[in-house]
Amino acid sequence: MTQAFQKVSAIRGMNDLLPGQSAQWERFEEIVRGWLRSYGYRNMRTPVLESTRLFARGIGEVTDIVEKEMYTFWDGAEGKQDQVTMRPEMTAGIVRATIEHNMLYDRPHRVYSIGPVFRRERPQRGRYRQFHQIDVEALGLAGPDVDAELIVMLARLWKMLGLTDIRLELNSLGQPAERAAHRTALIAHLEKHADILDEDGKRRLYSNPLRVLDTKNPAMQAMADSAPRLFDFLGEESRAHFDGLCQRLTDAGIEYRLNPRLVRGLDYYNLTVFEWVTDRLGAQGTVCGGGRYDGLIELLGGKPAPAVGFAIGMERLLDLWQQSVPAEAEAECDVYVVHQGEGAQRLAAKVGEQLRDAGFSVIVHAGATGFKAQFKRADGSGARVAVILGDDEVANDTASLKYLRGEAEGAASQQQVPLAQLAEVLKSKG
Ligand code: HAM
């Protein structure tokens, strides 16, 4: 006797995308691909699985992602195993590929990638363990004009999608030497307030003091507010870069807020960092984050080259989009073919192919059900018209039509058409 099989459910924090929701995703991806093309960005796809070392080095050993959120396992035959990780973001993989294929040897590249990323976070609305990013990178370009272009480009996307409740936060993290000077001052400040630091704060005091300021702990807010600001440690060049960016954003009519506490959760950034935030998604309101990472290509073994980019969280952006512009239900097909009898069933398959040749999307009813049930299914499919094939139609080489919606609905009910003219008639009825 076979044992009853215990049903399997999806892994917590990993979502199924069902047919009813996929139309909105596809529509969104279509808009996004057109938008990216209009700025000269080209698609690039890298593996979901990479060497763990890539992320540890690229994102930083002392980040939440690398310390506790990565899906990591041993892969390979015994004795020759490598530690591998499901990508928790896309930038490191794209930079790895850029170096591996020597892409920057003679020109810069504007690239994008769309796909799933994985982080073992505590799931809640807008925070998942598998989620999707639209990742956009400008590789080999140094100036604030490029930072500005990326931000202007995002503002255009929000406009294309009809999103308004979304604002820009901006900061500069300066260069490594400026951060080192600030770090010394910051550690001194944190040490002075060591008694109010919580466990995370104490743990990060020396390893990642900047992140201590990112605390949500109310007891530490005053201490964080009075901490020395990295922005005040920026040298002339870093300030000029930031001013250049702000100037261009003003030129483009884009509002921003300088947020000196914006440090981002990945270690590779320098100079510009930014986030787009909304209040309409509850606690997980950041729909897009990015910045400049001029040191990463060299850090991962490539020839030094500047770069800047961002990633949009697709689930969050789609949630916001759905709130602003509720998606319409999409029809499964244009034409639904119903039939009765074996001859009609075989003819239906043929007619289906002919109509597809003519450019229609067609569902041919499958399964032996009566006309009534078939019409119900035809109506539920959202098709504009049902093509009906029965014994009469097979005998006369005709098809009957029933318009299910649109202008012609009901009007030409059950009109008979010679098969040879079917596609033409359907076209003429718009
Ligand atoms: P990130 O800020 O870690 O940056 O992620 C980008 C976006 O992904 C976030 O703003 C958020 O919308 C979404 N996101 C992050 N975690 C989750 C989650 N658990 N569930 C749902 N959505 C989430 C990066 O990943 C950088 N690689 C961006 C970048 C590209 N910087 C330069 N180039």
Image: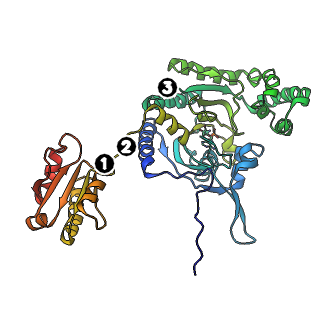
Give the amino acid type for the residue marked by disc 3 in the picture. Answer: Thr
* Classed neighbour count for the residue bearing mark 2: other residues with Cα under 10 Å, few (<14), some (14–19), many (≥20): few
Instruction: Give SS at disc 3.
Output: loop
**Which callout, 3 or 1, points at the residue further toward the start of the chain?**
3
Residue position for label 3? 164
Instruction: Give SS at disc 2.
Output: loop
User: Percent x, y for residue 396?
Assistant: 8, 65
Q: Residue at x 78, y 43 (%)?
A: 62
Task: State the quadrant of the N terminus.
Answer: bottom right
Left or right, residue 72 beside residue 116:
right
Residue position for label 1? 382
Give the amino acid type for the residue marked by disc 2 in the picture. Answer: Ala
Q: Distance between the residues labelled 2 and 3?
A: 23 Å
Q: Residue at x 53, y 21 (%)?
A: 254
Left or right, residue 35 beside residue 99:
left
Q: Say which quarter of the image contains residue 312.
A: top right
Left or right, residue 288 beside residue 160:
right
Q: Which of 410 and 118 is in front in this view?
A: 410
Residue position for label 2? 329
Q: Say which quarter of the image contains residue 411.
A: top left
Q: Nearer the viewer, mark 2 or mark 3?
A: 2
Q: Nearer the viewer, residue 66 or 128?
A: 128
Q: Residue 246 carries which label?
A: none
> Is residue 299 at all visible to an observer of this figure?
no
Count of marks, rendered view: 3
Q: Which of marks 3 and 1 is in front?
A: 1
Task: Check if mark 2's residue and mark 1's residue have beta carbons within 8 Å.
Answer: yes
Can you tell me whether the CB of the residue at mark 2 lies under 8 Å from the nearest atom of ligand 1? no
Q: Which residue is drawn at 68% across and 42% down?
A: 296
User: Percent x, y for residue 211?
Assistant: 77, 34
